[in-house]
Image (cartoon, coloured by chain):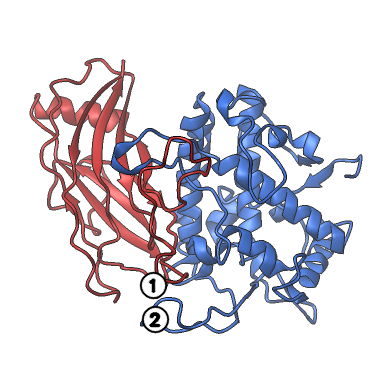
Amino acid sequence: MANRLTLRQNVESLELTSSGLIAFRDAVAKMQALSADDNRSWMFLAGYHGFSQFQCWHGGRIGLNQQALTYDLFLPWHRAYLITMEHTLRDQNAAAALPWWDWTSSGSHRVGVPLAYSTRRIGKTPNPLVSGPVPEVRSGRVPGLPPSPARKTTRSPGDPEDLPTADQVNSVLALTDFVDFSQQLQDIHDQVHGWTGGRNGDMGTIVFAGFDPIFFAHHCMIDRIWYLWQLRHGVQNVPPDYMNKPLAPFPLTVGDVLDIHRLGYEYAQASSSHD
Amino acid sequence: MTKGGIDMPKAPAAKSRKKAAPKKHVTTAIGTESLATGFVRADLVFDGLDHSGASFEARIFINNPDADANTEMTVQNRYAGKFHVFGHGGCFGDVGHCEVRGVPRPYDPRPAHPLTPMRKVVIATEALRREIKRNNGKGLTLTIVPIVRSGTVRCDYENVLKFDRVSVVTYA
């Protein structure tokens, strides 16, 4: 791991032709060009979250018949996923860093998906942030349902005014208990997934969301909110029994991912309140 | 913490996967006599919530059984809050892939199945305070209106809202 901290920036603050976005798009395009069987490829890493490995964590899992809450690894699992994706991108282009999408911003509430993720071509070059490759889903898996050929992700975003607001985020940041905070932040996260995917878009369901490049900008925003919460309420503030929980398939535990500086990155313009 | 709740009747198994209007659910009355008075926070807690299918928004109205997807989310309409579900999108494995395991054995080290029904907590302090007062100690009926936001060809849109139980939990 490099000694210098990688700076994750607000994507709306970056010009489309800025060096940061050029490097990021270059790395994404190179990953997308690799075959699904290559474990450095976009499709391979997207498959950690959804089809076909389904290793992601969402929500506290309540056992059948009202058993007690087990534990909720939503935030630490996705932090481990983001750092794995960022390192894989930097293996393709060492200047690449994941940007974050502030869906509470006035710009997002006006235009919705940021231009960096919706502009189809940058000059003469197709923009790899508009969509990502999805592997073939072969027939015969579920009787009576059609096969799905290899394709690119799509989006049908909703009305920009329906995106979450800064007030919603500030209410969540005020919660003091980690599990309570995580549950409420996940609800905002769920809202943005449904909004971005729309009726049949890939961001809208767990199975294909990770294939859409904007997934990672959305999750950087979620991770950044957790970081802001940690600045207020303590970096180590998770239930003690969480610390040694593994975050499969990544070689990390919850305790390993609590300090983002130890993981080698920082968020630009982060402060202890959500502005 | 005090709690009152109601179980949801089991939804019939889906007969078709075609896109149909999602069904809302109206609970029977939830008693409020046992709830602490003067609470500082009140939640609507949904347990056993299914998230295997489409992604949806669920809008909650109190004592307004006629509420539907066109009802404005206002105090006048007794709107209490909403939650969102990021759905799995249906099953993309072979038969049995998405079957949730039963009660885990005491020493089974694996975490619960990813599709184990989840809990959603809607913080609805002001709405519950207002409606409990307005209702003068009588039970509260919840109308939960699902609005599908996203899905796949493998989702049952009509029966997207499925949960075991909803409770009112107050904190003094």
Q: In which quarter of the image is the N terminus of chain A?
A: top right
Q: In this view, does B110 lie to the left or right of B56?
A: right
* Labels 2 & 1 near each other (Cβ < 8 A): yes
Circle 1 is placed at which residue position?
Answer: B154
Colour red maps to chain: B
Q: Is residue A98 visible?
A: no
Q: Is residue A248 left or right of residue A199?
A: right
Residue at 46 percent across and 44 percent down: it is A59
- Give the camera-side residue of A192 and B78: A192
Question: What's the residue type where badge 2 is placed?
Answer: Leu
Question: What's the residue type where badge 1 is placed?
Answer: Arg
- Give the camera-side residue of A167 and A222: A222
Q: Mark 2 lies on which chain?
A: A
Circle 2 is placed at which residue position?
Answer: A145
Q: Mark 1 lies on which chain?
A: B
- Give the camera-side residue of A122 and A65: A65
Q: Is residue B164 visible?
A: yes
Residue A198 place in picture, x, y as percent? 45, 67
Dot 2, crowdedness within 10 Å: few (<14), some or many (≥20)? few
Q: Is residue A106 left or right of residue B145?
A: right
Q: In which quarter of the image is residue A252?
A: top right
Up/down of A122 relative to A215, above or below:
below
Colour blue maps to chain: A
Q: Quadrant of the C terminus of chain A?
A: top right
Report the Cα–Cα distance between label 2 and label 1. 8 Å
Residue A51 place in picture, x, y as percent? 55, 66
Residue at 58 percent across and 74 percent down: it is A153
| Mark 2 vs mark 1: in front | 2
Residue A175 place in picture, x, y as percent? 49, 27
Q: Quadrant of residue A210?
A: bottom right
Query: What number is the disc on residue B125?
Result: none
Residue at 65 percent across and 72 percent down: it is A132
